Image (cartoon, rainbow, N blue to C red):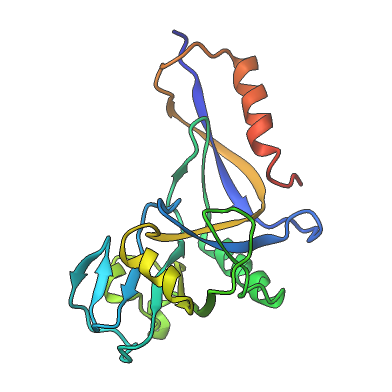
Amino acid sequence: MKPIKKPKFKMKLSNDPSKTPGVTTISLVNQPGIEINWIALSKDGKVNIDSIPIDIKLSIQDQQKQQLIGLALVPGLEIDRGLFSFEVDKEDIEAIVLKFFSEQRNGNVDLEHDGMLIDGAILNMSYNVERSLGIMPPNAYSNAPDGAWVIGMKVIDSALWDKVLDGTFNGFSIAGKFQMVPFEMSDVVEETEELDELDLYNRLQGILSTFSES
């Protein structure tokens, strides 16, 4: 089989806001795109990661709050999408977050990217880690780099909260449109099937058609 290099992209906002609206929705999913699960603060006052109770002292003290805390974007973290991968820089995360809130999209929540906005949860916390300013990541994500986007979500619907606790939903995943800028070729793709350059081009065109082009 013929080895093919896999392209890497940087995820950015375009200078033309009509082409790249950025993050439009925060989704509750079973398998987070960044492979980092959230913290779920349950009514018993404990924190759950993957439904395993772990005692972690958080700034949220109210045991009655059905509150989720997790990472939405992490600078420099490579996200593999099969034929290509992408990552986002700290400065671009800051711009993406600013646009998200300037468009007042904190109520845009769905499940598993189904596109059906729900009323049972709302984004009620957001900040970018910046240690030099004393803005630290949650204890469970103490290794998160500066620039990581930490979000908190209040779950209002009790049935939805039950699905969080039983592991149906384990993390956050963002949805939106961005400019994807190629910046390098990664290691050789595993040779699981025959692919020539034209095959790769056609497949990437199909995949990247979901993103806005500059």
Up/down of 29 relative to 120, above or below? above
Q: Quadrant of the N terminus?
A: top left
Quarter assignment of residue 200: top right
Q: Position of residue 56 (x, y in %)?
A: 21, 78
In this figure, what is the number of numbered marks? 0
Q: Residue furthest front?
A: 159
Q: Residue furthest top?
A: 1
Q: Position of residue 92 (x, y in %)?
A: 59, 62
Residue at 57 percent across and 69 percent down: it is 94
Vertical comparison of 178 with 172: above or below: above
Residue sitting nearer the eye, 99 or 156 = 156
Q: Position of residue 164 (x, y in %)?
A: 37, 66
Q: Residue at x 38, y 57 (%)?
A: 168
| Camera-nearest residue between 144 and 47 | 47
Q: Quadrant of residue 211?
A: top right
- Percent position (x, y) of residue 18? 81, 58
